[in-house]
Image (cartoon, rainbow, N blue to C red):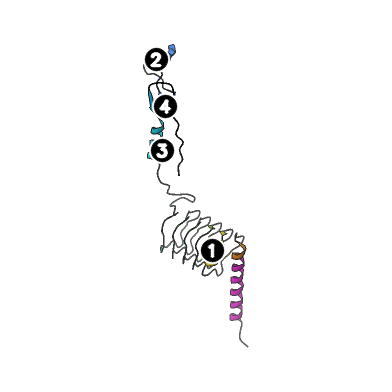
Amino acid sequence: MIALALTALSFTAPASSHYSASLRSRAVPTPQLSCDSSLRVPIAACALATVLACTTPALAVSGGGKDFSGIDVSGQSFADQQLSGKEFRGTKAKGTIFKGANLAGASFYKSFLDAADFTGANLKGASLEEAGLDGAIMDGAVLESAYLTKTIDEAKSITGADFTEAVMPPCALALALALALALTLTLTLTLQPQP
C-alpha cells in the first residue's frame, strides 16, 4: 500500500516586478514554489499521476523472481526448484509438490499447505508460522532454524525431518520428539532378529 501525503503546493511564476536586474534580462522567468501568487498550477495532482502511472506491481520480494503470495498454486509441482527466500504468504497450495526444493528462508505465513509434499525439501530458516499443514508430508525435510507454530502438529508425516534449532511451541516440539521416538522404537523392534 502506498501512502501519499498531498500538500497544497503550487507552481508559480513570480510577477516581473519581483525580478532582480539580472533576472529581468532573461527571456524566460525562473519558476518558484509559492503559495501567494495568482498563477498557480497544482503539482500535487501531477505528482500523484506520475506515481500512479509509474507504479508497476512487484514481481519479486526477497529471493528474486516471482512472488507467490496470495495466489493459488494447488496441485502444481515445484520439485527440485531453487525457491530460496520466496514469498508464499497466504498462498493456497493444497497438494502442491515441493519435493527436494530449496526453500531456505521462504515465508509460508498463513499459507494453506494441506497435503503438500515437502519430502527432502530444504526449509532451513523458513517461516511456517500459522501455515495449514493438515496432511502435509515433511519426510527428510531440513527445517533447521525454521519458525514453526502448533500447526506442525497437523502434518501427516515428519519421518527423518531435521528440526535442529527450529523455533517451535512446546507442544509441537513434544509431538516431534514423540513421533521420532515412536519411529525409532518401531524400527528397532522390527529390525531385531527373532529368536
* Image quadrant containing the C terminus: bottom right
Q: In the image shown, does 106 or 18 lie closer to the viewer?
A: 18
Q: Residue at coordinates 37% horizontally, 22% vertically from top-left?
A: 39
Q: Residue at coordinates 59% horizontally, 68% vertically from top-left?
A: 175
Element type where label 2 sits in the image: helix
Three-letter code, disc 3: Val
In 3D space, how far apart are the residues under numbered discs 2 and 4 (Cα atoms)?
A: 18 Å
The residue identified by callout 2 is 16
Q: Residue at coordinates 62% horizontally, 72% vertically from top-left?
A: 181
Q: Is residue 37 above or below residue 162?
A: above
User: Mark 2 packing: few (<14 Cα in 10 Å), some, or many (20+)?
Assistant: few
The residue identified by callout 3 is 51
Element type where label 1 sits in the image: helix
Q: Is residue 13 above or below residue 87?
A: above
The residue identified by callout 1 is 151
Residue 59 in picture, x, y percent from top left = 42, 49
Element type where label 3 sits in the image: helix
Q: Is residue 32 above or below residue 125?
A: above
Residue 35 in picture, x, y percent from top left = 44, 24
Three-letter code, disc 1: Thr
Element type where label 4 sits in the image: strand
Q: In the image shown, does 77 or 11 lie closer to the viewer?
A: 11
**Sooner in the amino-acid sequence: mark 3 or mark 4:** 4
The residue identified by callout 4 is 10
**Sooner in the amino-acid sequence: mark 3 or mark 1:** 3
Three-letter code, disc 4: Ser
* Image quadrant containing the N terminus: top left
Mark 2 in CB contact with mark 4 (< 8 angstroms): no
Q: Residue at coordinates 44% horizontally, 34% vertically from top-left?
A: 6
Residue range highlighted in magenta: 173-195
Examine the structure image and report whether residue 86 is included in the region drawn in magenta. Answer: no
